[in-house]
Amino acid sequence: MEPATAVATSVAAQTPRRISILGATGSIGCSTLDLIGRDPQRYDVVALTALNNADQLARQAIEHDADLAVLGDPDGYQDLKAALSGTNVEAAAGPDALVEAAERPADWTMAAIMGCAGLRPTLKAVEQGRCLALANKECLVSAGDLFMKAVSRSGTQLLPVDSEHSAAFQAIDPGISDTIEKISLTASGGPFRTWTHEQMKTATPQDALKHPTWSMGKKLTIDSATLMNKGLELIEAFHLFPVEAGQLDVVIHPQSIVHCLVEYADGSVLAQMSSPDMRTPIAYSLAWPERMWAPTERLDLAKIGSLEFESPDKERFPALSLTQDAMQADNGTTTVLNAANEIAVEAFLEGKIGFPAITALVMDTIDAAMRDGISKPDTLDDVFLLDEVSRGLAQSLLSDKS
Ligand code: NAD
Ligand code: MG
């Protein structure tokens, strides 16, 4: 039950906050709308976007009384327009329309498009200089330096939504961040935590999509099975927090209760805990700097009994070392890695390659890109070019394999 006091915060007394959600039909988008829909008078929904699910997007836009609904895929325009006919919701479609949606004035934008495709609209939202709740980690993996420069240029308040980064954000006092010794991101270990290398060779997409603790979109669930997700998160943390690459590490924690540990110079370790439900970090970003009630299962540590921790097995999960090397190289390799990983995960989901071949394809693409010569992207256009070239390399390596 929602406590009465939760509604009566000072935020409720203010005029409604203008909210946009980039990637509204996905796992993070739906969880965000779930929170907003519980207290609709507090929010004024400006724009909702998706790739191609016109019916779902139209339903969400009508239910939450959005001003604008946008599909990334231009072919969906007629369906979206038909589904919204007779309502006040404006319909638009195509990549430019996505960018225009992100430009519509909003006080708080959730960036939850999947993959590097989210980079351009998310950066437009950054340019508004208000609050950006960042779920889309691929933005930081592909273009971390440029992204963070845009954030500081615009004065945007960046609020990490990835559970580990939300946890670190909560545990870090910016005034004493120079005394941080280490940030440890926890990882559930995914569905193959206890599988042998031989067993993993036989893993199907159905096996990999059975995540033990979190409910997420498909791409992220596969990334969690390879541990590539944790590698991407190390890169994300490197850009978000004032630490060197060597101060970041990963600890396996199968219960997904402790999300991150921040260790200070005096030996104190501050951690954040919650049941594994993304509505907690989303609510944190939505209410920041206050707190709001969220409809999540409360932690009962006595019932849980024990919390386990172990070191990751970097041999069975080579994605971790691969991402750490790419992060240390600081030469554009992370852009290549992200692009190749997006292609590899799609190929695995389509049954074109086996599970271990996901990380192998990413490695091979990085090797091929290095042979051709890569350099750190200086501009956004450089990022998009390197992303495109890397996708091409990964696709051609994929056709060689099949
Ligand atoms: P999802 O696949 O469930 O949803 C993705 C959303 O983006 C959908 O609305 C989809 O229509 C839209 N989209 C996909 N491709 C697009 C394109 N090319 N152009 C425009 N829109 C596009 O994904 P998700 O699990 O909600 O994850 C979204 C982002 O949040 C990812 O970057 C993921 O890594 C990050 N994240 C997710 C979780 C989680 O629990 N789901 C946790 C932490 C971080
Ligand atoms: Mg995470």
Image: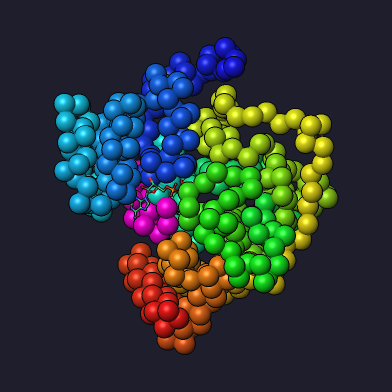
Query: On the picture, is 271 further left or further right than 380?
Result: right
What kind of secondary structure does the magenta stretch mostly adopt?
helix
Q: Residue furthest bottom?
A: 371
Q: Where's the N terminus, which quadrant?
A: top right
- Classify residue 79 by image quadrant: top left
Query: On the picture, is 230 further left or further right than 52?
Result: right
Up-down relation of residue 147 to residue 97 (above or below): below
Q: Residue at x 51, y 80 (%)?
A: 364
* Residue 397 visible within the image: no
Up-down relation of residue 326 to residue 67 (above or below): below
Residue 125 lies in the magenta-colored region: yes
Q: Residue at x 26, y 31 (%)?
A: 67
| Residue 292 in the image, given as x and y percentages of width and height | 56, 25
Residue 268 lies in the magenta-colored region: no
Residue range corresponding to the magenta coloring: 114-128
Depth check: 340 or 288 in front?
Answer: 340
* Residue 309 visible within the image: yes
Q: Residue at x 50, y 75 (%)?
A: 361
| Residue 310 in the image, given as x and y percentages of width and height | 78, 57
Up-down relation of residue 147 to residue 313 (above or below): above
| Residue 195 in the image, given as x and y percentages of width and height | 69, 63
Q: Where's the C terminus, which quadrant?
A: bottom left
Q: Residue at x 67, y 56 (%)?
A: 189
Query: Number of numbered discs present?
Result: 0
